Amino acid sequence: MNPFSDLMPVKNKNITIAVLPFQITSNEDRIKQLFSGFVEDLITQFSKFIGLSVVSSYSTQRIKDISNEKEIQQLGADFLIYGSVRYVKDILRISIQLIKTEDQSLVFGNQYNETLDTLLETQDEIIQQIVTVLQEKINYNLLSHSYKKSSVELAAYENYVMGMHILQKGTGDNDIKARHYFEAALHINPNYSLAYTGLSLTYFNFWSCLIWNRWDESMQGAHKYALKAIELDPNDYTALGVLGRTYAYMGEYEKAEHYLRKSLRMNSNDCSHLLRVAFTLMYLGYAEESVKLYHKAIDLNPFHNDHYYAHGSNYYLAIGDFEKSIALSKKVDFNSWTDFPAYVAAAHLQLKDYKSMWHCWDIYLTQFKNAVYSGQKELEEEALEWLMIVNPFKGFTYLTPLVEFIKTEKNSGSQTKEVRAKQHISNVFQLNGDIWEMCYQGDAIALKDTKGLNDIHKLLGHPEQEFHCMDLMNAAVDEHTSTKSLDQKAKMAYQKRIKELQEDIAEAETLNQIEKITPLRAEYDAILEHLSQSLGLAGKSRTSGSTLEKARSAVTWRIRSSIKKIEILHPGLANHLSKSIKTGSFCSYSPEIEVDWEL
């Protein structure tokens, strides 16, 4: 059950459709890549129709087959689009079915025999045929505006699809790589508006906003290419959304609102777009509307990642619901973006929870120092200035009282400041709800609860004391038991999980879900390591030891995995733990330097 179900509004009354991943029998990477883009494009184009809501591909990608009834039910879709593709002798044999979820009845079905060159025209035909069928199901016109995809050479389309795939990985290097693909598309077709939109996004990357030291350059590039995109296609909702954001940063709020409103008219059913627009509307003073768009995005993406909660936390702060803002913040790591902890600190300040406020502020300073700090000014001074520059609110924001409070405390010799200074230099490893709060040598971080962090906490509380791995596992042991490591059923389960992890890792990389990639890879590596130890030549199962050996391996893995997570946010603390914690049959914490922990 969703613990935040009380925050959810009544589901919208539109007809909801889910486009499931196509079943592709060809092993050619080009075909797989094309139809991955094909499905994404179907979702995007269907989302343009008024009265038709489309479930996000982030949620539908985990549906492996039409028989996955439980997962399909969770999507909440009224209709499913299910397709298969066979590539035989240069002919694409595409089968499409429109299925009514309620009774699994077939509403529409068709088969298409196409070549690669006619693929995009087929997409137009599929959309129009299905919309015609659905028009009979609702009492008003589905079309938000006339839609007909401009004819574009397949090679240009392929470059665009590849560029978007790389762009969504959300790093500076991938922005540059994606830019090359968009430029290649424009070389083939200089009037390809989507390629200009892609170029715009490489400069103003909505998924990461990582290159802060090139902020002006990024803004100018984003603005320039977004203008070019809508010059070629006035209905390009992504480019319109980019312009709304850039005009807000320029202080031209009326223009910003104009482009944002138009982008929503063009497409109000793309969940990623809804969140981007909601953030800028929050800047313009429409926080209540931002909350509504946030919940609509959740409806359209029921399997959304935790990053959504960071958005919701900010929007609830903006409307003054501080308890909900804090509750949502606890569902996500504080490194969602650099200044997110400052927003949470502002919520704690309004509730006069000064200890939590200072804790969040210290995390913000650490992230600012690692990602943004130029060294031209004192750290806190530059962090305060930057916080207001990158959050261009038109009117009042709860960040302002936070900034004023920090400045007052900074310039005064008050007892509050002295208490904060003591907290700042203390070494903390404490669990608050389901979030571990850590501070070491003045730098603070926060991570979600894991078994490995609990193990570390127990070791820190008893320096130099050895704990048997079974004590940490809290499991029974039978030293006389010796069994085959893996039976055939277990092997198949591992193989299935490995495939799922490969897909989840690829999905996380595509969607820039940085917080998910590390634990997924850790689990993937652990399974492979376990299999390598459990399988002998030709994949035959080895005879392995007792529960003791399993406990030793499990405890070692989860402690080392947790230290790797810490290393991403706090290399100094991770280095100390790596050198001081011994794992194996007996685990212990023998600090290289004496540390006074608050546990």
Image: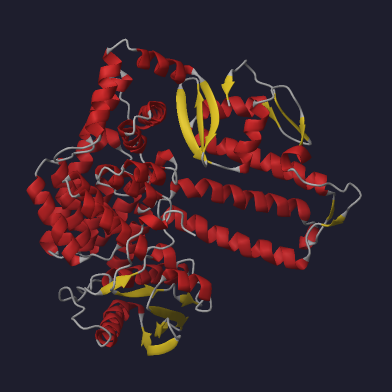
Residue 235 visible, this orientation: yes
For the point 64% across and 25% down, the residue is 579
Q: How many marks?
A: 0
Residue 377 visible, this orientation: no
Rendering coords of residue 103 (x, y %): 45, 86
The residue nearer to you, when weighing 179 against 341, is 341
The residue nearer to you, when weighing 410 against 353, is 353
The residue nearer to you, when weighing 370 against 282, is 282
Q: Is residue 401 left or right of residue 309?
A: left
Q: Can you name the residue that lies furthest to the right here? A: 480
For the point 58% across and 63% down, the residue is 499
For residue 453, what is the image quadrant?
Answer: top right
Rendering coords of residue 2 (x, y %): 46, 57
For the point 69% across and 67% down, the residue is 492
Q: Can you name the residue that lies furthest to the top here? A: 413
For residue 541, what is the image quadrant?
Answer: bottom right
Rendering coords of residue 314 (x, y %): 31, 44
Rendering coords of residue 349 (x, y %): 32, 31
Give the colour scheme of this rendering.
secondary structure
Q: Is residue 378 left or right of residue 547?
A: left
Q: Is residue 521 left or right of residue 263?
A: right
Q: Quadrant of the C terminus?
A: top right
Q: Is residue 70 left or right of residue 200?
A: right
Reply above or below: 577 against 41.
above
Reply above or below: 430 against 100.
above
